[in-house]
Image (cartoon, rainbow, N blue to C red):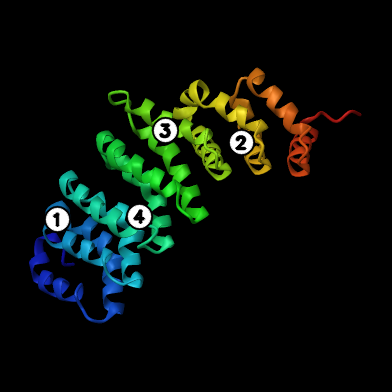
Amino acid sequence: TVGASRWDRLAPLFKRLVRDERRAVRRVMSHSLHELARLLGTEITERDLVDAFNLFLRDLDDVKIGAVKHMAAFLKEITEPIREKCMKIIKDTCANPKHSNWRFRLLLAKQIDDFVSFLSPVYSYDVIVPLCFELIDDPVHLVGDSACKALGHVLVYCEDNNNRKAQVCNRILELKKARSYSVRQQFVRICHAMIGFEENVQLFKQQFLEPLVDLSSDKVSNVRLLVANVLLEHKFKFPKDKIETALKSLREDNSRDIALLIQGIVEKESPVEC
Protein backbone atom coordinates (compact mmCIF):
# COMPACT_ATOMS: atom_id res chain seq x y z
CA THR A 1 0.00 0.00 0.00
CA VAL A 2 1.24 3.45 -0.92
CA GLY A 3 0.31 5.78 1.94
CA ALA A 4 1.46 9.14 3.23
CA SER A 5 5.06 7.97 3.58
CA ARG A 6 5.33 7.19 -0.15
CA TRP A 7 2.93 9.81 -1.50
CA ASP A 8 5.77 11.55 -3.35
CA ARG A 9 5.71 8.64 -5.85
CA LEU A 10 2.03 9.19 -6.68
CA ALA A 11 1.79 12.99 -6.39
CA PRO A 12 2.87 13.74 -10.00
CA LEU A 13 0.30 11.27 -11.35
CA PHE A 14 -2.39 12.71 -9.05
CA LYS A 15 -1.74 16.24 -10.32
CA ARG A 16 -2.09 15.08 -13.93
CA LEU A 17 -5.32 13.19 -13.25
CA VAL A 18 -7.12 16.09 -11.55
CA ARG A 19 -6.53 18.15 -14.70
CA ASP A 20 -7.19 15.33 -17.17
CA GLU A 21 -9.20 16.48 -20.20
CA ARG A 22 -11.61 13.56 -19.79
CA ARG A 23 -14.41 14.49 -17.43
CA ALA A 24 -14.94 10.84 -16.42
CA VAL A 25 -11.41 10.78 -14.97
CA ARG A 26 -11.88 14.07 -13.13
CA ARG A 27 -15.22 12.83 -11.82
CA VAL A 28 -13.61 9.76 -10.23
CA MET A 29 -10.94 11.95 -8.66
CA SER A 30 -13.53 14.40 -7.35
CA HIS A 31 -15.55 11.64 -5.67
CA SER A 32 -12.48 10.11 -4.01
CA LEU A 33 -10.70 13.25 -2.82
CA HIS A 34 -12.11 13.14 0.73
CA GLU A 35 -10.87 9.55 1.15
CA LEU A 36 -7.39 10.56 0.01
CA ALA A 37 -7.43 13.40 2.54
CA ARG A 38 -8.33 10.98 5.32
CA LEU A 39 -5.52 8.61 4.35
CA LEU A 40 -2.81 11.19 3.72
CA GLY A 41 -3.32 13.48 6.70
CA THR A 42 -3.52 17.23 7.15
CA GLU A 43 -0.06 18.31 5.95
CA ILE A 44 -0.17 16.55 2.57
CA THR A 45 -3.85 17.39 2.09
CA GLU A 46 -3.20 21.10 2.50
CA ARG A 47 -0.14 20.99 0.28
CA ASP A 48 -1.43 18.83 -2.59
CA LEU A 49 -5.20 18.26 -2.33
CA VAL A 50 -6.76 21.61 -1.41
CA ASP A 51 -6.01 23.13 -4.82
CA ALA A 52 -7.63 20.12 -6.48
CA PHE A 53 -10.70 20.47 -4.24
CA ASN A 54 -11.10 24.14 -5.16
CA LEU A 55 -10.58 23.29 -8.82
CA PHE A 56 -13.32 20.66 -8.75
CA LEU A 57 -15.75 23.16 -7.18
CA ARG A 58 -15.42 25.23 -10.37
CA ASP A 59 -15.59 22.26 -12.77
CA LEU A 60 -18.52 20.92 -14.79
CA ASP A 61 -21.52 19.87 -12.69
CA ASP A 62 -20.99 16.11 -13.06
CA VAL A 63 -17.40 16.55 -11.80
CA LYS A 64 -18.23 19.16 -9.18
CA ILE A 65 -20.86 16.92 -7.57
CA GLY A 66 -18.19 14.65 -6.04
CA ALA A 67 -16.43 17.48 -4.21
CA VAL A 68 -19.73 19.01 -3.06
CA LYS A 69 -21.19 15.72 -1.86
CA HIS A 70 -18.21 15.03 0.41
CA MET A 71 -17.05 18.56 1.27
CA ALA A 72 -17.70 18.28 5.02
CA ALA A 73 -15.58 15.13 5.19
CA PHE A 74 -12.81 16.87 3.26
CA LEU A 75 -12.88 20.10 5.31
CA LYS A 76 -12.65 18.10 8.52
CA GLU A 77 -9.15 16.97 7.53
CA ILE A 78 -7.64 20.47 7.19
CA THR A 79 -6.77 23.29 9.60
CA GLU A 80 -9.06 26.20 10.36
CA PRO A 81 -7.35 28.94 8.29
CA ILE A 82 -7.31 26.79 5.12
CA ARG A 83 -10.81 25.52 5.87
CA GLU A 84 -12.17 29.06 6.02
CA LYS A 85 -10.64 29.89 2.63
CA CYS A 86 -12.30 26.79 1.18
CA MET A 87 -15.62 27.77 2.75
CA LYS A 88 -15.51 31.08 0.90
CA ILE A 89 -15.12 29.24 -2.42
CA ILE A 90 -17.91 26.84 -1.44
CA LYS A 91 -20.23 29.78 -0.79
CA ASP A 92 -19.28 31.44 -4.08
CA THR A 93 -19.77 28.28 -6.15
CA CYS A 94 -22.65 26.50 -4.39
CA ALA A 95 -24.86 28.92 -2.45
CA ASN A 96 -26.03 31.43 -5.06
CA PRO A 97 -29.38 30.44 -6.68
CA LYS A 98 -28.48 32.42 -9.81
CA HIS A 99 -25.22 30.62 -10.42
CA SER A 100 -25.58 27.11 -9.02
CA ASN A 101 -27.61 23.96 -9.55
CA TRP A 102 -30.22 23.63 -6.78
CA ARG A 103 -28.92 20.13 -5.98
CA PHE A 104 -25.61 21.65 -4.89
CA ARG A 105 -27.44 24.04 -2.57
CA LEU A 106 -29.39 21.11 -1.14
CA LEU A 107 -26.17 19.17 -0.50
CA LEU A 108 -24.69 22.26 1.12
CA ALA A 109 -27.71 22.72 3.40
CA LYS A 110 -27.66 19.05 4.41
CA GLN A 111 -23.99 19.25 5.45
CA ILE A 112 -24.31 22.34 7.67
CA ASP A 113 -24.88 20.01 10.65
CA ASP A 114 -21.46 18.50 10.00
CA PHE A 115 -19.79 21.88 9.41
CA VAL A 116 -20.76 23.32 12.80
CA SER A 117 -19.44 20.25 14.61
CA PHE A 118 -15.86 21.23 13.71
CA LEU A 119 -16.06 24.96 12.95
CA SER A 120 -15.49 27.51 15.70
CA PRO A 121 -18.58 29.16 17.30
CA VAL A 122 -17.37 32.58 16.12
CA TYR A 123 -17.04 31.40 12.52
CA SER A 124 -20.41 29.67 12.75
CA TYR A 125 -22.06 32.93 13.83
CA ASP A 126 -20.22 35.01 11.23
CA VAL A 127 -20.59 32.71 8.23
CA ILE A 128 -22.76 29.64 8.81
CA VAL A 129 -25.75 31.40 10.38
CA PRO A 130 -26.03 33.96 7.54
CA LEU A 131 -25.60 31.09 5.07
CA CYS A 132 -28.52 29.28 6.72
CA PHE A 133 -30.76 32.31 6.28
CA GLU A 134 -29.71 32.64 2.63
CA LEU A 135 -30.60 29.01 1.99
CA ILE A 136 -33.88 29.30 3.92
CA ASP A 137 -34.95 31.87 1.32
CA ASP A 138 -34.05 29.54 -1.56
CA PRO A 139 -36.69 29.28 -4.30
CA VAL A 140 -36.51 25.47 -4.12
CA HIS A 141 -38.57 24.17 -1.19
CA LEU A 142 -36.30 21.19 -0.43
CA VAL A 143 -33.32 23.52 0.00
CA GLY A 144 -35.18 25.93 2.28
CA ASP A 145 -36.61 23.10 4.37
CA SER A 146 -33.17 21.53 4.87
CA ALA A 147 -31.74 24.92 5.86
CA CYS A 148 -34.51 25.37 8.46
CA LYS A 149 -33.56 22.02 9.99
CA ALA A 150 -29.88 22.96 9.89
CA LEU A 151 -30.45 26.24 11.73
CA GLY A 152 -32.13 24.36 14.57
CA HIS A 153 -28.99 22.22 14.81
CA VAL A 154 -26.62 25.21 14.59
CA LEU A 155 -28.12 26.64 17.79
CA VAL A 156 -27.07 23.48 19.65
CA TYR A 157 -23.40 23.92 18.80
CA CYS A 158 -23.15 27.69 19.04
CA GLU A 159 -22.43 28.76 22.58
CA ASP A 160 -23.68 32.20 23.59
CA ASN A 161 -20.85 34.47 22.48
CA ASN A 162 -21.29 38.15 23.36
CA ASN A 163 -25.06 37.74 23.22
CA ARG A 164 -24.90 36.59 19.60
CA LYS A 165 -27.22 33.64 20.14
CA ALA A 166 -29.84 36.16 21.26
CA GLN A 167 -29.29 38.07 18.02
CA VAL A 168 -29.87 34.91 16.00
CA CYS A 169 -33.03 34.17 17.99
CA ASN A 170 -34.33 37.69 17.33
CA ARG A 171 -33.71 37.22 13.61
CA ILE A 172 -35.68 33.96 13.69
CA LEU A 173 -38.53 35.69 15.55
CA GLU A 174 -38.70 38.33 12.82
CA LEU A 175 -39.77 35.58 10.39
CA LYS A 176 -42.92 35.06 12.43
CA LYS A 177 -43.99 38.68 11.75
CA ALA A 178 -43.43 38.53 7.98
CA ARG A 179 -46.22 39.50 5.59
CA SER A 180 -45.45 36.51 3.39
CA TYR A 181 -47.12 33.33 4.65
CA SER A 182 -44.25 31.24 3.22
CA VAL A 183 -41.81 33.08 5.48
CA ARG A 184 -44.07 32.45 8.48
CA GLN A 185 -43.97 28.78 7.51
CA GLN A 186 -40.17 28.99 7.63
CA PHE A 187 -40.48 30.15 11.24
CA VAL A 188 -42.63 27.11 12.07
CA ARG A 189 -40.16 24.75 10.38
CA ILE A 190 -37.24 26.24 12.31
CA CYS A 191 -39.22 25.79 15.54
CA HIS A 192 -39.90 22.17 14.59
CA ALA A 193 -36.19 21.56 14.00
CA MET A 194 -35.23 23.31 17.21
CA ILE A 195 -37.50 21.17 19.39
CA GLY A 196 -35.90 18.04 17.94
CA PHE A 197 -32.74 18.71 19.97
CA GLU A 198 -33.03 18.28 23.71
CA GLU A 199 -30.43 21.02 24.21
CA ASN A 200 -32.78 23.53 22.55
CA VAL A 201 -36.01 22.70 24.39
CA GLN A 202 -35.53 25.18 27.23
CA LEU A 203 -34.56 27.95 24.82
CA PHE A 204 -37.61 27.11 22.72
CA LYS A 205 -40.00 27.27 25.69
CA GLN A 206 -38.61 30.63 26.78
CA GLN A 207 -38.57 32.41 23.44
CA PHE A 208 -40.44 30.54 20.72
CA LEU A 209 -43.37 28.62 22.20
CA GLU A 210 -45.74 31.58 22.55
CA PRO A 211 -44.97 32.98 19.06
CA LEU A 212 -45.54 29.50 17.63
CA VAL A 213 -48.86 29.16 19.46
CA ASP A 214 -49.88 32.61 18.16
CA LEU A 215 -49.60 31.26 14.61
CA SER A 216 -52.31 28.68 15.39
CA SER A 217 -54.72 31.50 14.51
CA ASP A 218 -52.84 32.61 11.38
CA LYS A 219 -55.09 33.72 8.52
CA VAL A 220 -53.48 31.19 6.15
CA SER A 221 -54.57 27.59 6.64
CA ASN A 222 -51.24 26.12 5.46
CA VAL A 223 -49.48 27.94 8.31
CA ARG A 224 -52.05 26.70 10.84
CA LEU A 225 -51.67 23.15 9.52
CA LEU A 226 -47.90 23.25 10.05
CA VAL A 227 -48.40 24.62 13.58
CA ALA A 228 -50.93 21.87 14.33
CA ASN A 229 -48.46 19.19 13.23
CA VAL A 230 -45.67 20.62 15.42
CA LEU A 231 -47.86 21.03 18.51
CA LEU A 232 -49.25 17.51 18.18
CA GLU A 233 -45.89 15.87 17.53
CA HIS A 234 -44.19 17.52 20.51
CA LYS A 235 -47.09 18.35 22.83
CA PHE A 236 -45.70 16.32 25.74
CA LYS A 237 -42.66 18.65 25.79
CA PHE A 238 -44.86 21.72 26.32
CA PRO A 239 -46.75 22.96 29.39
CA LYS A 240 -50.35 21.81 28.88
CA ASP A 241 -51.83 25.22 29.67
CA LYS A 242 -49.71 26.83 26.94
CA ILE A 243 -51.11 24.78 24.07
CA GLU A 244 -54.55 23.65 25.26
CA THR A 245 -56.35 26.73 23.92
CA ALA A 246 -54.50 26.52 20.61
CA LEU A 247 -55.39 22.84 20.13
CA LYS A 248 -59.03 23.52 21.01
CA SER A 249 -59.15 26.29 18.42
CA LEU A 250 -57.48 24.09 15.81
CA ARG A 251 -59.93 21.26 16.55
CA GLU A 252 -62.74 23.61 15.50
CA ASP A 253 -60.81 25.07 12.55
CA ASN A 254 -62.76 25.88 9.41
CA SER A 255 -60.10 24.02 7.42
CA ARG A 256 -61.25 20.41 7.13
CA ASP A 257 -57.65 19.10 6.95
CA ILE A 258 -56.68 20.75 10.23
CA ALA A 259 -59.87 19.78 12.09
CA LEU A 260 -59.59 16.15 10.95
CA LEU A 261 -55.91 16.04 11.93
CA ILE A 262 -56.61 17.25 15.47
CA GLN A 263 -59.75 15.18 15.95
CA GLY A 264 -58.04 12.05 14.63
CA ILE A 265 -55.21 12.37 17.11
CA VAL A 266 -57.58 13.03 20.00
CA GLU A 267 -59.71 9.99 19.11
CA LYS A 268 -56.62 7.74 18.93
CA GLU A 269 -55.49 8.89 22.36
CA SER A 270 -58.91 8.69 24.02
CA PRO A 271 -59.48 5.56 26.16
CA VAL A 272 -61.93 3.04 24.70
CA GLU A 273 -64.99 2.50 26.87
CA CYS A 274 -66.04 -1.09 27.32
| Residue count near mark 4 (Cα–Cα under 10 Å), binned few <14, some 14–19, many ≥20 | many
C-alpha gap between disc 4 and disc 3: 20 Å
What kind of residue is marked 3? Arg
What is the secondary structure assignment of the residue under circle 2?
Answer: helix
Residue at image mark 2: 230
| Residue count near mark 2 (Cα–Cα under 10 Å), binned few <14, some 14–19, many ≥20 | some
User: Residue 232, can we see it?
Assistant: yes
C-alpha gap between disc 3 and disc 2: 21 Å
C-alpha gap between disc 4 and disc 2: 29 Å
Residue extending farthest bottom: 22
User: Residue at point 76% right, 35% down?
Assistant: 253
Residue at image mark 1: 46
**Which mark is in front, 4 or 2?**
4
Q: Which mark is residue 171?
A: 3
**Which mark is in front, 3 or 2?**
3
C-alpha gap between disc 1 and disc 2: 44 Å
What is the secondary structure assignment of the residue under circle 1?
Answer: helix
Q: In the image, is 124 to the left or to the right of 155?
A: left
